[in-house]
Image (cartoon, rainbow, N blue to C red):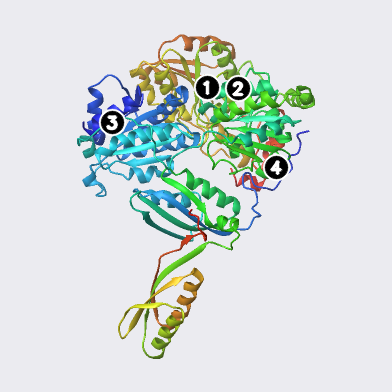
């Protein structure tokens, strides 16, 4: 009756994960108080979740509320856990999975924008080419002398990635990126 | 009012009568205030870990928050183990730590550590108080956060200059912060759905957990009422023992790795599972993809992150167990008629499993079997007002199997974290809360030595705790796993230099008893109960007994290893290579 002791060959508490990971963007509204960002980041590292991008800034000064935008990757089950774990943090007011919300609204994905500062140094043809391409990408020159440009570029992550890749052979020196800021389309707030 | 005065005032305003602590440089102003009042009694422990576990035992046995007070640096780091323990087992614990003056924070000052940084992942929330005018509000909020929603530990870190500074004290207020609003009332539609599912069940089971105990005694009453109304069988996790009485006719015993055969088989074969305040821990579920494969699962929990974490719930109900049970009982009475006859075949099947008598062991008239020791302890104490704590290991599982709990809040054990050294200080905390009751720490010889210094505190406060050691000279559970998993190579699990526990008890000023004969055990236990001071009972038990039944690693509920099947060969082959990697 109880003699089924042949090896099952399977893990004790880890069932094999068959679901595919997805990239989602979360908006987290928090009280802007010391340590709140550490709580959020600590949750991700402590429970083994991924952070692909993270931005944070106070968005409502009189209420001391900050909005954290996190791009993360995981299976739907893990993404649901991340949302609930974030909601457990005491100074967290709301967590919205913008990607899920966008799907509910019949949209492909939420609006996501990033800003980057890109420093390019060079002379001659490379310099001219850099300026010409920057114009094509609608990047603006915010600092320059005869040896370098600093471009400011805003847009989707893919556009910024592409711009940086193109600048690489033209004398790319350094890049600074803000991470993704995101919200859903339409009249409703989060 | 100074910050230190505010701390004492806030303790009083939050109904604190006892706190457990250890003084040091960074909390001296608070200790000075404690000295000058009589409302709050301070219990001096011998190690900060002891303070934490004592406060946990106090909290678990009373339903109130446990409070501990420690100094900065090593005081705070020693508190980490009980904080994590309380987090895993959802125990309301308020820990107040001293900190170096604000001007010295970050300078690597004497006894400085980043307390809020270190304790952030092992608390429900924590605060560093930099302004004395915020201190009172934070302390009140700390009690609120610790005791509401899913209870848990909190830390308030108070720099020494804030303790000296003068400011305005604000009394506790009712309006909590807007971001923290635990949902207590369950969605009625979901409860209706659950009741309908339960009414249609042919092979139902109720699986209850520590959440029922946390929710208060009313939740336990409601659970009992629900079981009576429905006629469903009920099992419980380690943390939930006592919510339903062990003498109740629908009781199947504990489930999980060392749970009863009937409980685990019923979990595996059920068609409707009602999980009430439990969290599908890995010690409960066994192999997840074989966990109760054919059942619809109803899951009641106050913590949204517990639902769908390990096991997907078909009917999730978010809310306080007590409130949801109230609705559930009411709706069952109104709508569902218990067709108890329909459950007869299920009960017949359960009776067959029960007949396997999975907790059986071979009695020995020369040596005390550990199971026998627990049974005799139970028989000699069940008519008394008894509280049981345990350490962690084989003795803990035997206690859970063989000691019958009739009421909630009578069983204090470290479930989630599995902290050796929990039981003795927890017993101290329980005894402080219930000075007239019989408080017994069922201990192992290895675990008990981890916090044995609190015997000294027990003597100081005339807390007549009884430390009942099942002494087999081994770390029994470690050895059992080495036998199962590591070719019987008993690497460092034997204690060659065991202290003389009787002399040790006497050295502390307590009473020592030794017993190694089964026929002398009852008299020795009676002696232990009769002595009105702390006792260490050195119960010499069979050294190589192992804890069965057991679900080996990588196995499902219906693949339990039963005691009569646990031959050397079966034990050696019970866990395959993959299971071996997974603990």
Chain letter of mark 3 equals B
Give the labeled residue for mark 1: B217
| Crowd rating for badge 1 (residues with CA inside 10 Å; few <14, some 14–19, many 20+) | some
The residue positioned 21% from the left and 39% from the top of the image is B161
The reply to whether residue B317 is in sight is yes
Mark earlier in primary sequence (3, 4): 3
Secondary structure under the numbered disc 1 in the rendered image: helix
Measure the alpha-carbon separation of dots 2 and 3.
39 Å
Measure the alpha-carbon separation of dots 3 and 1.
30 Å
Question: Do the residues bearing badges 2 and 1 touch, measured as CB atoms within 8 Å?
Answer: no
Chain letter of mark 4 equals B
Measure the alpha-carbon separation of dots 2 and 4.
27 Å
The residue positioned 42% from the left and 84% from the top of the image is A130
| B63 or B381, nearer to the observer | B63
Quadrant hosting residue B480: top right
Secondary structure under the numbered disc 3 in the rendered image: helix
Q: Name the residue at the front extreme.
A: A187
Q: Are marks 3 and 4 on the same chain?
A: yes
Which of the two discs, 2 and 4, sits closer to the camera? 2
Give the labeled residue for mark 3: B7
Does A84 sit above or below residue B443? below
- Where residue B503 sits in the image (x, y, percent)? 40, 19
Q: In the rendered image, which quarter contains the N terminus of chain A?
A: top right
The reply to whether residue B45 is in sight is no
Quadrant hosting residue B231: top right
Give the labeled residue for mark 2: B244
| Crowd rating for badge 3 (residues with CA inside 10 Å; few <14, some 14–19, many 20+) | many
Measure the alpha-carbon separation of dots 2 and 1.
11 Å
- Where residue B116 sits in the image (x, y, percent)? 35, 43
Measure the alpha-carbon separation of dots 3 and 4.
51 Å
């Amino acid at each position: 009756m109880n003699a089924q002791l042949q090896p099952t060959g399977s893990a004790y508490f880890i069932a094999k994960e068959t679901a595919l990971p997805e990239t989602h963007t979360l908006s987290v509204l928090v009280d802007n108080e010391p340590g709140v960002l550490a709580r959020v980041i600590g949750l991700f590292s402590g429970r083994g979740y991924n952070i692909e991008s993270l931005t944070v800034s106070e968005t409502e000064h009189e209420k001391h509320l900050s909005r954290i935008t996190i791009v993360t990757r995981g299976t739907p089950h893990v993404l649901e856990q991340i949302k609930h774990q974030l909601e457990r943090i005491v100074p967290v007011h709301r967590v919205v999975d913008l990607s899920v919300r966008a799907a509910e609204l019949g949209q492909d994905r939420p609006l996501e924008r990033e800003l980057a500062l890109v420093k390019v140094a060079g002379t001659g043809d490379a310099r001219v080419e850099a300026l010409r391409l920057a114009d094509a990408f609608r990047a603006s020159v915010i600092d320059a002398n005869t040896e370098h440009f600093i471009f400011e570029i805003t847009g989707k992550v893919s556009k910024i990635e592409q711009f940086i890749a193109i600048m690489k052979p033209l004398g790319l020196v350094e890049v600074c990126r803000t991470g993704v800021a995101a919200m859903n389309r339409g009249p409703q707030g989060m | 009012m100074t910050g230190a005065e505010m701390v004492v005032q806030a303790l009083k305003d939050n109904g604190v009568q006892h706190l457990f602590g250890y003084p040091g440089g960074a909390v001296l102003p608070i200790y000075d205030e404690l000295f000058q009042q009589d409302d709050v009694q301070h219990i001096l422990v011998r190690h900060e870990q002891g303070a934490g576990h004592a406060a946990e035992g106090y909290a678990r046995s009373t339903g109130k928050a446990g409070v501990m007070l420690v100094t900065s640096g090593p005081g705070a780091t020693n508190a980490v183990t009980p904080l994590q323990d309380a987090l895993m087992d959802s125990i309301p614990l308020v820990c107040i730590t001293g900190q170096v003056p604000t001007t010295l924070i970050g300078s690597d000052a004497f006894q400085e550590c980043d307390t809020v940084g270190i304790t952030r992942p092992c608390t429900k929330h924590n605060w560093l108080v930099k302004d004395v005018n915020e201190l009172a509000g934070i302390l009140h909020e700390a009690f609120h956060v610790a005791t509401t929603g899913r209870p848990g530990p909190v830390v308030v870190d108070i720099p020494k200059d804030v303790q000296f500074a003068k400011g305005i004290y604000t009394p506790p207020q009712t309006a909590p912060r807007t971001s923290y609003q635990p949902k207590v009332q369950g969605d009625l539609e979901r409860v209706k759905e659950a009741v309908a599912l339960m009414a249609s069940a042919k092979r139902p089971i109720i699986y209850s957990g520590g959440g029922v105990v946390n929710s208060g005694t009313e939740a336990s009453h409601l659970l009992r009422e629900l079981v009576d109304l429905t006629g469903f069988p009920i099992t419980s996790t380690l943390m939930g023992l006592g919510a339903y009485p062990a003498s109740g006719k629908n009781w199947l015993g504990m489930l999980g790795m060392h749970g009863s055969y009937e409980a685990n088989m019923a979990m595996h074969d059920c068609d409707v599972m009602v999980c009430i305040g439990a969290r599908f821990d890995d010690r409960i579920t066994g192999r997840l993809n074989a966990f109760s494969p054919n059942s619809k699962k109803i899951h009641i929990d106050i913590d949204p992150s517990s639902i769908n974490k390990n096991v997907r719930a078909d009917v999730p109900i978010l809310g306080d167990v007590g409130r949801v049970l109230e609705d559930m009982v009411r709706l069952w009475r109104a709508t569902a008629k218990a067709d108890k006859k329909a459950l007869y075949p299920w009960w017949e099947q359960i009776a067959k499993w029960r007949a396997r008598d999975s907790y059986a062991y071979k009695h020995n008239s020369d040596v005390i079997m550990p199971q026998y020791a627990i049974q005799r302890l139970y028989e000699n104490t069940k008519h008394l007002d008894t509280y049981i704590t345990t350490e962690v290991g084989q003795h803990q599982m035997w206690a859970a199997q063989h000691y019958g709990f009739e009421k909630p809040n009578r069983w204090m054990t470290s479930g989630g974290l599995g902290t050796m050294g929990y039981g003795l200080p927890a017993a101290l905390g329980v005894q402080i809360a219930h000075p007239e009751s019989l408080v017994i720490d069922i201990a192992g010889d290895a675990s008990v030595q981890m916090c044995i210094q609190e015997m000294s505190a027990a003597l100081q406060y005339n807390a007549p705790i009884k430390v009942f050691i099942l002494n087999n000279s081994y770390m029994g559970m470690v050895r059992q796993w080495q036998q199962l998993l590591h070719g019987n190579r008993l690497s460092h699990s034997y204690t060659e230099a065991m202290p003389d526990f009787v002399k040790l008890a006497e050295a502390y000023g307590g009473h020592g008893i030794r017993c190694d004969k089964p026929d002398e055990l009852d008299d020795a236990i009676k002696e232990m109960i009769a002595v009105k001071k702390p006792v260490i009972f050195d119960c010499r038990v069979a050294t190589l007994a192992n804890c069965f039944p057991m679900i080996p690693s990588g196995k499902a509920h219906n693949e339990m290893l039963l005691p009569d099947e646990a031959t050397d060969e079966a034990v050696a082959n019970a866990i395959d290579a993959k299971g071996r990697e997974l603990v």
